Amino acid sequence: MHETARERVWIALSDLYLDTDIDALIAPCARVLAASPFSRDELAQLLFEDVHPVLAYNLAASAGVWEGFDHQWLCARIHARAQGWHARMRPSWWFGRREMRRRWSQVDAIIAALRSHAASP
């Protein structure tokens, strides 16, 4: 599968939804996002509007996905949602937004530092 920049971001962000200790995954995720062509605001939008509605269920699962989401499945679900499938999604996708905001603030701080360092002479 040839992934677009947007899909690479979705895949990196999906690690934030794994049912495991994600502390070790924060920095690698941030590196992928920092290297992307998207602004930090656009990255937050991709997280909360594209990835979160599809993967929020895993935050509540008693035995959720912990090894990683299938990339093709993830991208297909997000693309399908963008084409109107979202109307059939349960409202429970709002679950976990507070936790995800906390995780996002960690990732965003690393992105800012990486981009600031890259921009320095």
Image: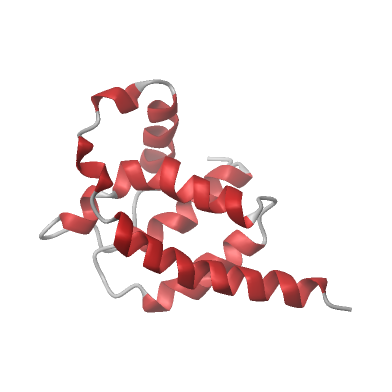
| 13 versus 42 height, above or below | below
Query: Which residue is at the far front?
Result: 98
Q: Is residue 17 left or right of residue 75?
A: left
The x, y position of residue 67, in whole percent, is: 29, 63
At 40% across and 67% down in the image, what residue appears? 103
Query: Which residue is at the far top?
Result: 84
Q: Is residue 21 left or right of residue 50?
A: left
| 58 versus 7 height, above or below | below
Please count the marks in the image: 0
At 29% across and 75% down in the image, what residue appears? 21
At 66% across and 53% down in the image, what residue appears? 39
The x, y position of residue 24, in whole percent, is: 41, 78
Give the quarter of the image for residue 111: bottom right
Observer-nearest of 89 and 11:
89
The quarter in which the C terminus is drawn is bottom right
At 66% across and 50% down in the image, what residue appears? 38
The x, y position of residue 37, in whole percent, is: 70, 51
Q: Is residue 72 left or right of residue 43?
A: left
Give the quarter of the image for residue 2: top right
| 46 versus 64 height, above or below | above
Observer-nearest of 99 and 89:
99
| 92 versus 35 height, above or below | above
